Image (cartoon, rainbow, N blue to C red):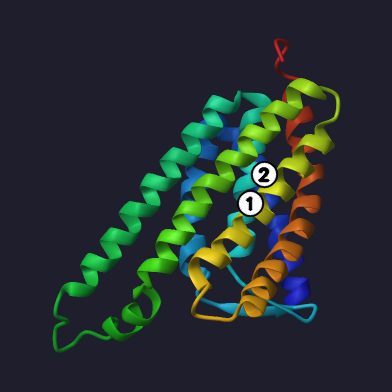
């Protein structure tokens, strides 16, 4: 069941990105990246099993940002991708600070949300900082690699898309696991967590390639200067 839901979710997610860019342009992708990052930080609390691999539910939303920034870089330029990631970083920081501030309020006698909010929004500072840092660094690395490969191999969209995304995903998973969990778990467990996340996100990266082509060529027929 989880496999079917995951594949369906991926298709819907990637299709939404293509349609949002078609109707709203780069501004739509700015909104997607910021929104997806915040959503991912909420649903990452839930762990699931897919094909015998244990992972967090936030991986799909986190991975969707790579497709969104690749579309921005391919069609508008890397400077817009960097801007989108900077916007997402600020949005996520605001989200984290706001939710923590909300938890400080003493709930009223009729309140029914406080306990659930504490479970969902109570954060481990080390994990949160590690997650934010690796989100920012890995997405910047993806944009940089994509741009360099575009200049070197202008006719190999599949190469720059997959290479930059896979390298960046692995960078994010391994460094996040080390920064967040080393000392809490033994090294073997930390590496298993990182490897599992990387395997799933590599699969996601391969699946997003057709959607990047779809986005590119739908616009190419309309924009003569591309």
Left or right: 217 as drawn, with respect to 43: right
Q: Quadrant of residue 177?
A: bottom right
Q: Position of residue 196 (x, y in %)?
A: 71, 70
Percent position of residue 150, x then y: 75, 26
Q: Is residue 219 left or right of residue 73?
A: right
Left or right: where does residue 118 sit relative to residue 136? left
- Can you say which quadrant of the picture contains the N terminus? bottom right
Identify the residue shown where x is 66% and y is 48%: 168
Q: Residue at x 70, y 10 (%)?
A: 225
Q: Secondary structure at mark 1?
A: helix
Residue at 61 percent across and 23 percent down: it is 76
Question: Between residues 16 and 66, which one lies in front from this camera angle?
Answer: 66
Circle on res. 64: 1
Q: Secondary structure at mark 2?
A: helix
The CA span between labels 1 and 2 is: 5 Å
- Residue 76 seen in the figure: yes
Identify residue for label 2.
67
Residue farthest to the top? 225
Q: Is residue 5 above or below residue 225?
A: below
Check disc 1: other Cα within 10 Å, few if <14, some if 14-19, many if 20+. many
């Amino acid at each position: 069941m989880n496999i079917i839901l995951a594949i369906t979710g991926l298709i819907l997610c990637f299709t939404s990105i293509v349609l949002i860019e078609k109707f709203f342009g780069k501004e739509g992708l700015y909104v997607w990246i910021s929104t997806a990052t915040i959503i991912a930080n909420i649903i990452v609390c839930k762990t699931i099993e897919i094909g015998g691999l244990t992972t967090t539910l936030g991986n799909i939303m986190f991975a969707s940002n790579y497709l969104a920034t690749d579309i921005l870089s391919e069609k508008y330029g890397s400077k817009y991708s960097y801007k989108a990631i900077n916007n997402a970083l600020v949005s996520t920081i605001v989200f984290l600070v706001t939710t923590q501030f909300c938890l400080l309020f003493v709930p009223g006698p009729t309140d029914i949300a406080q306990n659930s909010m504490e479970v969902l929004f109570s954060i481990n500072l080390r994990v949160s900082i590690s997650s934010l840092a690796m989100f920012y660094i890995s997405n910047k690395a993806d944009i940089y690699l994509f741009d360099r490969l575009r200049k070197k191999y202008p006719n190999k969209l599949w190469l720059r898309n997959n290479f930059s995304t896979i390298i960046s995903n692995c960078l994010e998973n391994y460094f996040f696991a080390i920064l967040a969990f080393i000392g809490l778990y033994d090294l073997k467990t930390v590496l298993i967590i990182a490897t599992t996340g990387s395997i799933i996100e590599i699969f996601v990266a391969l699946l997003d390639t057709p959607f990047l082509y779809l986005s590119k060529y739908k616009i190419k027929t309309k924009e003569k200067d591309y």
